[in-house]
């Protein structure tokens, strides 16, 4: 069986002149440039605010207004609320370090309410009424695709913090989560090599799971894996008895799980009720992280696998500071996870691009963002100027009894994002573009 070949690794020779950011202490961050030129301006008191003012422009007086748009209610609130919290933490750290272009960042929070129409409405409000400089937000691919026409028509800029199915490119989106070659594809290959080639697919019925599973089916056909079942349920679905029976009958080597939101609570509790542990039926999830584990219960998930780019246990100095700062602000019982960390990273990357551009103008920020690096909690990440995605290390993790995730495998270096899987012959035709 073919071993994984990392053909698109981050080349150190191409990194000269790139912007980098370093975290300074547990409660404050400082922007600094590799060349040593100052990124920040004079220090100012932390003036981060929340609210939904509806007048003025993005840059007004001593502030720069940005939007935060996540589901704070509905089925996706279990995942998105904490991403909002991380984005606010990053804003407050940057403000404490002097702000951006010498101005304090003011944030306007809106609730997408786990509803695509509401996301569209709120995105329009943020860009038209609030006139924000940029927006950090969304989780599901359905919500992202719902708001992209709004950002494109208003020439706004969305920083999207979650792994996704790829096959997309908008000049008005910065994709900070994993592309499929940085999560889905390596996870399936790892699982097939270590557990066996028989795969059962379970997902929520919307664009991410269906596209992810189309990728997996193409990969399986090329690699000699076998798809022994494929099931979808609506968002918020709670009865998985029939699907669990089908899983037992199919006897897969592993289940690849793309359920999202609180459906995962029902699925894993009912899997446990059926007497099935990770020793009986291994699952690998790509939308369950530490935050969701806390909501589901570690006892139901212990031993199961996940695929991400960051865990709370990731061993970097930056992560130690990040976790300490997050817990200091929100409570020792809170956890960090991949989308939480990516939301935090997105704010710092935007701030660096604004400093480099010398303006919040979207076109100038987009151009400046190409090649920017950040010493993130997950390790150094870099925006690929070719596709506005990010170089990221791939990590497979095992959920432990404490509700955290132990890394069991990782790539040696950050992997170049390949959203259209153009580096894989078997993916030709998946996107409708030439590979």
Image (spheres, rainbow, N blue to C red):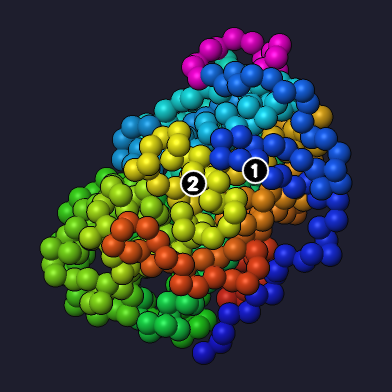
Which residues make up the magenta segment?
50-65
The residue at 70%/69% (across/down) is 9
Q: Is residue 223 left or right of residue 91?
A: left
Chief secondary structure of the magenta portion: loop
Residue 84, label in figure: none
* Image vertical order of residue 33 relative to residue 426, above or below: above
Residue 127 visible (yes or no): no
* SS for callout 2: helix
Residue 4, percent from left and from top? 58, 80
Residue 15 visible (yes or no): yes
Residue 169, percent from left and from top? 64, 49
**Residue that numbered label 1 is attached to:** 23
Pick the residue in front: 342 or 221.
342
As drawn, the residue found furthest toward the bottom would be: 1
Residue 135, percent from left and from top? 58, 31
Pick the residue in front: 270 or 148.
270
Q: Are there few (<14), some (14-19), or many (20+) residues within 10 Å of tag 1? A: many
Residue 323, label in figure: 2
């Amino acid at each position: 069986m073919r071993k994984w070949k990392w053909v698109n690794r981050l080349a150190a020779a191409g990194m000269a002149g790139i912007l980098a950011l370093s975290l300074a202490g547990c409660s404050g961050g400082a922007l600094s440039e590799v060349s040593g030129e100052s990124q920040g301006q004079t220090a100012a008191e932390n003036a981060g605010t929340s609210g939904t003012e509806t007048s003025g422009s993005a840059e007004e007086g001593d502030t720069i207004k940005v939007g935060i748009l996540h589901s704070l209610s509905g089925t996706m609130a279990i995942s998105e609320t904490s991403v909002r919290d991380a984005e606010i933490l990053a804003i407050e750290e940057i403000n404490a370090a002097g702000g951006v272009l010498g101005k304090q960042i003011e944030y306007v929070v809106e609730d997408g309410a786990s509803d695509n129409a509401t996301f569209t409405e709120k995105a329009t409000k943020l860009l038209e009424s609030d006139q924000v400089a940029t927006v950090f937000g969304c989780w599901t691919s359905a919500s992202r695709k719902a708001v992209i026409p709004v950002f494109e028509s208003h020439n706004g800029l969305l920083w999207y913090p979650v792994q996704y199915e790829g096959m997309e490119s908008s000049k008005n989106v910065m994709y900070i989560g994993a592309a499929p070659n940085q999560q889905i594809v390596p996870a399936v290959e790892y699982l097939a090599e270590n557990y066996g080639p028989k795969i059962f697919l379970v997902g929520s019925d919307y664009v991410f799971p269906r596209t992810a599973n189309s990728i997996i089916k193409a990969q399986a056909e090329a690699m000699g894996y076998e798809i022994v079942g494929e099931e979808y349920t609506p968002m918020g679905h709670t009865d998985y008895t029939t699907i669990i029976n089908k899983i037992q009958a199919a006897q897969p080597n592993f289940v690849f799980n793309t359920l999202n939101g609180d459906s995962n609570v029902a699925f894993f509790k009912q899997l446990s009720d059926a007497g099935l542990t990770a020793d009986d039926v291994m699952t690998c999830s790509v939308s369950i992280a530490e935050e969701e584990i806390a909501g589901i219960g570690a006892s139901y998930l212990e031993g199961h696998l996940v695929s991400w780019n960051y865990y709370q246990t990731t061993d970097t100095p930056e992560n130690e500071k990040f976790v300490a700062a997050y817990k200091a602000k929100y409570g020792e019982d809170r956890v960090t996870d991949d989308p939480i960390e990516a939301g935090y990273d997105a704010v710092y990357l935007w701030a660096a691009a604004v400093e480099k551009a010398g303006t919040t103008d979207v076109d100038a920020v987009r151009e400046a963002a190409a090649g920017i690096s950040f010493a993130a909690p997950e390790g150094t990440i870099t925006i690929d100027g070719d596709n506005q995605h990010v170089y990221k290390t791939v990590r497979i993790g095992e959920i432990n009894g404490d509700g955290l995730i132990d890394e069991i495998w990782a790539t040696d270096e950050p992997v170049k994002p390949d959203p259209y899987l153009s580096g894989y012959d078997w993916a030709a035709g998946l996107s409708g573009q030439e590979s």
